[in-house]
């Protein structure tokens, strides 16, 4: 038998085989209930589902692809500003942090919503 002996307040010892397992299970349940976020183009109501979709919208807004030195990033820049949008190469890693970066750099164009 392996595990951890836990001392209860009433003076009883109990062998717990997976200490913290209940907390881990609760954390996993909370994470699974966390709503998915989506980047929405306000003018069309379209949810961005791929980088091809995002690139079309950003190009129409004056953003251009930026081919910097990092092959792990998908980047855009605007000639009229110093802003740079850097995204992970894999769309599956595109999360709310990147979505809010796009929203801040394109006010009144995008919105992040629960899906």
Image: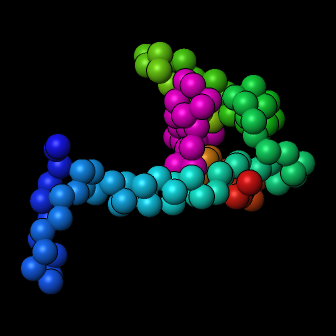
Q: Residue 47, relative to residue 4: is it above or below?
A: above
Q: Position of residue 105 (x, y in %)?
A: 61, 50
Q: Residue 59, relative to residue 14: is it above or below?
A: above
Q: Position of residue 86 (x, y in %)?
A: 52, 34
Please identify the quarter of the rendering in which residue 87 is found. Answer: top right
Quadrant of image for the C terminus? bottom right
Q: Residue 111, relative to residue 47: is it above or below?
A: below
Give the residue drawn at x 27%, y 51%. 18
**Side of 90 where 49 appears, left or right:** right
Please identify the quarter of the rendering in which residue 48 is found. Answer: top right
Q: Residue pushed farthest right?
A: 44
Q: Nearer the viewer, residue 55 or 78?
A: 55
Give the residue drawn at x 58%, y 58%. 34
Please identify the quarter of the rendering in which residue 70 is found. Answer: top left
Q: Position of residue 65 (x, y in %)?
A: 63, 24
Q: Nearer the viewer, residue 49 or 83?
A: 49
Give the residue drawn at x 57%, y 25%. 90
**Side of 28 where 15 appears, left or right:** left
| Residue 103 seen anywhere in this rendered image of the structure | no
Question: Magenta residues?
Answer: 80-98
**Side of 24 where 104 appears, left or right:** right
**Side of 45 where 48 appears, left or right:** left
Give the residue drawn at x 70%, y 49%. 38
Quadrant of image for the N terminus? top left
Q: Nearer the viewer, residue 91 or 20?
A: 20
Q: Is residue 36 magenta-colored?
A: no
Q: Residue pushed farthest bottom?
A: 10
Q: Position of residue 25 (x, y in %)?
A: 42, 55
- Image coloring type: rainbow
């Amino acid at each position: 038998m392996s595990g951890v002996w836990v001392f209860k307040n009433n003076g009883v010892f109990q062998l717990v085989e997976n200490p913290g397992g209940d907390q881990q299970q609760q954390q996993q349940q909370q994470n699974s209930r966390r709503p998915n976020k989506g980047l929405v183009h306000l003018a069309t109501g379209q949810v961005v589902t791929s980088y091809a979709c995002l690139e079309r919208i950003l190009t129409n807004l004056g953003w251009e692809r930026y081919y910097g030195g990092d092959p792990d990033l998908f980047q855009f820049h605007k000639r009229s500003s110093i802003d740079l949008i850097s995204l992970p190469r894999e769309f599956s890693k595109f999360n709310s942090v990147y979505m809010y970066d796009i929203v801040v750099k394109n006010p009144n164009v995008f919105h992040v919503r629960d899906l």
